[in-house]
Amino acid sequence: MARGWIALLLLGIIGCSCASAAPSDFLLQKIGDGVWAAIVNDEGKAGGNVGFVVGDDGVVVIDTFQDPEPAADLLAAIRKITNLPIRFVVNTHYHLDHVNGNDVFAAAGAVIIAHRNARGWIRTENIKMIDPPVTAEKKARVQSIALPNLVYDTSVDLYLGSRRVSVRYYPGHTGGDSVVSVPDAHVVFCGDLLWKDHIPNLIDASTPAWIKTLDAIEADYGESTWVPGHGGIANAADIATFKKYLVDLHATVRDQQSKGRSGDALVQTILPSLKSKYGKWGFFDELAGANISDTAQELAGTKKLPSH
């Protein structure tokens, strides 16, 4: 699997300076009354999409980027919109590209919230993402990230005065994933349970559960504006497209395994057909081969997932 590329994606924080991140790291979009999404530039430092919700008496931030620099820029952008306190940060899952700006918002006084499993994995499971050599400096950075100080098991509702922000657990991407919805604005922040026109990271995935989750969130939230973990603002058709990718991948790998293919031969057999359908998606060159290998391990029962 492309562990080295994932490490570069998630650990661009090592050796960063204190200068402000480039404006091109993310684009701020208003997607509802008091609801904003920060859609990242794949080539920048921000990593994964984030968002924030302004209520009567405070702000909820959803995820914090992969680098403290764009996280500080996001905080500054919020301050241009409102002076209300940052009451909560929700980490949608434990991966570094969504939590490595936690320190910035913790210092601003936010309570950090996540699924119970995500708190347990931020400083442990993220070590496997480090590109060798695993230096003391790299490990120290991962192990110093501000952890969630409030956890939940199935659901929690946050209130910004009269405005409710709903946080719900759904399985699939990591085993500790949160979907954050703003009912009065019909906006849903999916974290990495949804990728738009991007090949996903399947390192911790349980594909059958993920496919069921995509059906569930459509049913649970209805017609909404959807914010994926990677890619632009999405709609119901984008959910269907992403689900089809997971279904196609799972079925194709299973079919080729039944013909006796495994290892690199399996990857090289499947990759051309996958490229013909999804080759224009972001991260294809970096993650498509890894997706095949991870799915093969899942179907063979040899995939190692984070322990609950």
Image (cartoon, helix red, strand yellow):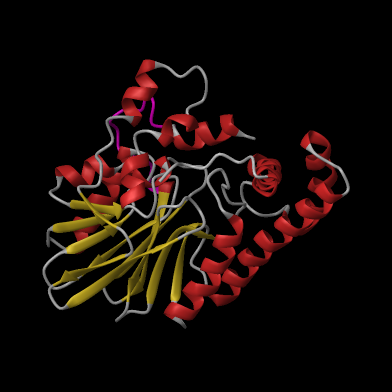
In which image quadrant can residue 221 be found? bottom left
Q: Is residue 257 left or right of residue 226?
A: right
- Position above or below: 224 against 68: below
Task: Provide residue 143's location: percent of width, then percent of height.
Answer: 31, 29
- Name the chief secondary structure element in magenta: loop
Q: Write the residue at 64% across / 68% down.
A: 241
Q: Write the residue at 22% across / 42% down.
A: 104
User: Which segment is the magenta one?
Assistant: 12-23
Quadrant into which the N terminus falls: top right
In terms of depth relative to the viewer, which is nearer, 121 or 289? 121
Does residue 261 belong to the magenta stretch? no
**Res 123 visible:** yes
- Position above or below: 55 against 90: below
In terms of depth relative to the viewer, which is nearer, 32 or 141? 141
Does residue 17 belong to the magenta stretch? yes
**Res 196 visible:** no
Outermost residue to the right: 259
Task: Provide residue 284's location: percent of width, then percent of height.
Answer: 67, 47
Task: Provide residue 3's location: percent of width, then percent of height.
Answer: 58, 32
Q: Write the residue at 36% across / 16% down.
A: 136
Q: Is residue 35 left or right of residue 283?
A: left
- Position above or below: 189 against 111: below
